[in-house]
Image (tube, helix red, strand yellow):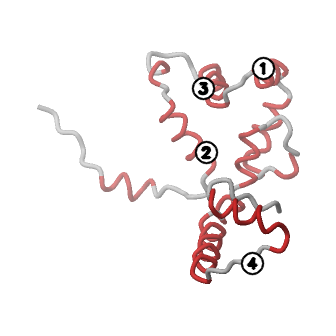
Amino acid sequence: MKKSLTIFLIARKAVEEAGDNFVWQNITMRNVLTQLQTEFVNRFTDFKKSSLNMEIFQNPFAIDISEVPSNLQMNIVDLQSNSTLKTAFKESTDLIQFYGDFFNSQLPQNKNCSRLTDEHLDAILRVSTTKMKADVKKLASQMQPQKSH
């Protein structure tokens, strides 16, 4: 892995001046940077766990079907076999716009379709990729019935 210190200008200058023989003289700075590196690793481990989900949405046409969770395999097969969508994906420069167009073309056309916003798309993607199950009976029991006037 290449170590990049472009954000830390003073540190970068010191490393460049010392070349390959660079050793941190300030133990406190070394400890702070080591702790920072550890925190980055700890904070971003979720990205590794979610990398397959990100790959699926980043380019659903290049993903190997055998790597896709079984509940999404048929959707990905349908998507990959649709040459119109594949062309639209290749020509698209914006994933959000592509998926917005995709969902708009797949949803039944009604008066609520115009309400599909980036926030709604984000929510749809979260719900469709989560492994959490809703407790519908509990949620329904907590709702108050609507009383007539």
Q: In this figure, which residue is indicated by the disc labeled 1?
A: 91
Q: In this figure, which residue is indicated by the disc labeled 3?
A: 100
Q: Position of residue 76 (x, y in %)?
A: 79, 38
Q: Residues within 10 Å of mark 4 (few under 14, many from 20)?
A: few
Q: Secondary structure at mark 3?
A: helix
Q: Secondary structure at mark 2?
A: helix
* Mark nearer the N terminus (1 vs 3): 1
Q: Secondary structure at mark 4?
A: loop
* Mark nearer the N terminus (4 vs 1): 4
Image: 71 above or below 120: below
Q: In this figure, which residue is indicated by the disc labeled 2?
A: 128
Residue, x 49% and y 20% (percent of image)? Answer: 113
Q: Which label sits in the foreground, 2 or 3?
A: 3
Residue, x 73% and y 22% (percent of image)? Answer: 92
Q: Which label sits in the foreground, 4 or 2?
A: 4
Q: Quadrant of residue 80?
A: top right
Q: Residues within 10 Å of mark 1 (few under 14, many from 20)?
A: few
Q: Which label sits in the foreground, 3 or 4?
A: 4
* Mark nearer the N terminus (2 vs 3): 3
Give the label on residue 77, or none. none
Q: In this figure, which residue is indicated by the disc labeled 4?
A: 23
Give me the C-alpha separation between circle 2 and circle 1.
25 Å
Q: Position of residue 75 (x, y in %)?
A: 75, 37
Which residue is at the far left?
Answer: 149
Image-based side of 82 in relation to 143, left or right:
right
